[in-house]
Image: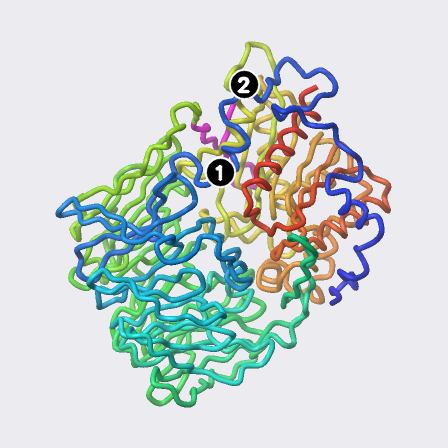
Amino acid sequence: MSSPSGASLRGGPWTLAAALCVVAAVGCRPASPASDSGTLRSAPMSPTILPATDSPITFERIAAFPPPGWQIPRRVRTAPSGRWVTYLQSESGSDEMALFAFDPAAGDHRVLLRASDVVASDKPMSREEELRRERQRKRIAGVTSYDWAARADVMVIPLGGHVYLRRADGTIAQLTRAEQPDIDPQIAADGRHVAFVRGSELFVVSADGEEKQLTHDAVDGVTRGVSDFNGQEEFNEPHGFWWSPDGQRLVYLEVDERQVDRLPVMGYRDGADLQELAYPRAGRKNPTSRVAVVSVEGGEPRYLDLPEDARFAPDDQYLGRFAFSPDGQTLYLQRLSRSQRDLALVRVDLASGEARHIHLERHDAWLELSAMLPIDEGRLLWTGYRDGHRHLELRDGTSGELLRALTSGAWDVTAIHAYDAANQRVLFAATKESPLERHLYAVGLEGGAIDRLTAEPGVHEVELEHPERGWVDIHSSNDRPPAATIHGPGGEVIGQIEVPHDADFDGLGLRAPELVTVAATADAPELHGALLTPRHMKPGERYPLVVMVYGGPGVQMVLDQWNPRLLWQHLADRGFVVWQVDNRGSTGRGHDFETPIKLELGKVELADQLRGLAHVKQLPYVDPSRVAIYGHSYGGYMAIAAMLRAPGTFQVGIAGSPVTDWRYYDTGYTERYMDRPADNAAGYDHSSLLPLADKLQGKLLIVHALMDENVHFEHTAAMIDAFVAADRDFDLVVFPGERHGYRSPAARRYAYRRVVDYLVEQLGR
C-alpha cells in the first residue's frame, strides 16, 4: 500500500539501512552499556548529576500502573434503585480492577466481582479487543467495564470475550459462550436484552440466554455495529450501535472499509506477527458508513436516507454523537464534512424515516462534533462556538432554531453532564474559573446566573448521569492527590469512596511542580507551564534542563491537577531541571488559541516552545548549554522538529513514536489541521521532517514500537532513510511486540531507563 508521496512499507522507507537498525534494536551506533543502577559508565559525571540511587523512585516504579495517588474509583455509576454507588478499583494497588459497591446510607462497602471469579486469568485478549483498548487508552486489567441498565437493577459485565449478567439478586450468569469474542456489549434500558458484535455482525441475547443474530451476510471489510478507526481514534466514538430508550430497537453503523488502503504491520511476538489493518492515510480513501435501524425481534434492517448534500458525501463525511429523544421516536446524529469545516445536526423521525438537517455550522479552520443532549420531545442542548469559545445553547428539537444562549464569556464548556428536570437546570463542566481548572456548574433553562457546584480549586472529574441520584466528584489539585466524594441531589456530601494510600507514597518524596505563566508578547498570547527544580540545589550551580513536550492539538498537559510525574521526579532528584509548556494548538483556552496551527503543523507550536524555553533559560540555576527535549507521539514529532528546525538550541532530543511526515498519518486527525495533501501541498512539505535531516546537530534517540497501530513504524523508517542519506548519526530503540502505548511493564521500564541513561550520558558530563 503506497502513501500519497509514493513511499511504501514494502519499499520506500524500508531500505537496508532501516532494516539493519531494526535488527540492531538499540541503534545505528551502539550506546554504552548501562550499569545496574541505571547510569552509564563512560566519562566522569558532572558533579551536578547524582546517581540513580539518590532517587527513591526506581524505573520499575515509574513504569508501574497506577501512579502514586491514582488508585481512584473508575467508571463510577449509580444503581437505578439509587442505593448503590458502583465502581472499579484495584484491591492490590496494581492495574487489576475489581467491581465494588458502596451504600453511603449504611456505610456498606463490598466487592461485587473479581475477574478471577469467572474467567481464567491467562485467557488471551482478542486482536479486536486489543485494538479497541489501544484506541480508548485503557490501561487496566481484570474487570475493565460494566454498565447498569437504566431502569432495572441488573448490569452487563464483559469478561474474557463473553457477556455476563449480574442480576438483581446478585447472581452472575454467563449469557454467551461462542468461540469468537463478543465486542462492546451494551444493555437495554429495561435490562431484558444485551446487544453486542460478533464476527462483524450485530447480535442480541436475552437475560435468560436466548441469542439472536440481527444482521447477516457480512463480507470481509464490512462491519455492522463497530465504529471505524477514525471514529474510535479521532472522534471519541467508541460505539457503533445504540439502544432506543424502550429497548425495542437498535440503531447501528454499517462501515465499509473495502476501499481503504491496507497497511501491513509487522511485529514479533514469539515469532513473526504480520497484521494487516485498514488505515486511511491523509488524502486517501475513507470508509463509507450507513445508518440502519433493526428491531430487537429481528427482521430486515431499515437503512436511513440522510439528506443529500455535496458537503457530506457518503465517503467524505464522519458520523457521530447519536442520541434519541426521551420518548425514543426521534433520533439525532451529527455529520461532519471530510474537510471538518461543516457540521450538520440531523433529525430523523423514526416512524417515517424522514431525515432533515435542522442546524448547520461552518468554520474557516475546523469544527468538532458537538456535545449534545436531547432533554424532552421538543428541545435539546447543544454546544456551539460563541466569540471564540464553546458555550451552551438551548435549541428547538424539531427546527433546530436557537431558543437561547445559556452561557457566554471568555471560557469554554467542556462537557454537558446532565439535565436536571426537577429543577429545570443544566449541569455542565467548564473552565470558567481558570483554563487550568475544571468545575461543575449549573444554569437554568432560562439562562441567567451560573452556580458553581464544586468549591475547591483544581480539577473536578464528575461522574453524573442522573441528577436525582446525585453525583461523585473526584477532585485533585497540583499539590493534592485525588479524593472521591459522593454528593446527594442537592450537592451535600453524603459519603466518601476511599482512595487507598500507596504503601510507598511517603517514601517517594514527591514534590509539586511550580505552575508558571510565560508573559504574552505583541503577537502571541501568554502560555502556561510547569517547572520542577532539582531537589538538591547549590548556590551558584547551573543544572541541565529537560523540556518535556507534547504540543499537539486537542490536549492540555498543564493543569492544576494531581500528576506525580515520576519521570520528572526521578530526573529532578538526580539534578535536572524539568519544564513543560502548553503551546498554541492545545485545548482549554478557546478555539482562537487552537486554530493558529492550521495548514502547517509544527510551526506555531515550536515558536511557542522556544518562547517557553527562553523564559526558563534565563533562570540563574539553568545551564543554557545543556538542554534536552523529550516527547512521545506528537511530542516525538515536536522533539525531532526542535532538533532540525532550531539546530543547536537543544543538545539532546529524544523522540518516542514520532510522526515524521503527515502524509503517513490518518485522515480524521491530519486533514482537520492540514486539509488534504492535494489542497495544501506546501503545508505538508513544510511540516515534514524528512527534508530537514541534514540539519541535525547534537544527539538524537528515537524510540518506536514496531507494531504501533497509531503512528506506524513507517514514520521512523522514513526518518532513518533520511538520516542515512544525509550521513547524520542517531540512536534507535525498537520494541518488536509493542504498540503505541507500551503494554508490558518490562518495555515501559526499559524505555524509561534508556531515556534517563541517554540524558545522563549526554548532559551529565
Q: How many neighbours does mark 2 have within 10 angstroms: few (below 14), some (14-19), or many (20 or more)?
A: few
Snapshot quadrant of residue 196: bottom left
Callout 2 amino acid: Asp
- Give the residues in magenta: 512-534
Is residue 518 something that shows in the picture? no
Is 80 displayed left or right of 39 in the figure? left
Q: Which residue is at 46% across, 64% downward?
A: 237
Residue 54 is labelled as 2
Q: How many neighbours does mark 1 have within 10 angstroms: few (below 14), some (14-19), or many (20 or more)?
A: some
Q: Quadrant of the N terminus?
A: bottom right
Residue 204 is labelled as none
Q: How many marks?
A: 2
Q: Which residue is at 75% across, 35% downward?
A: 647
Judge whether 143 appears above or below 574 on screen: below
Q: Which residue is mark 1?
A: 64
Is residue 474 something that shows in the picture? yes
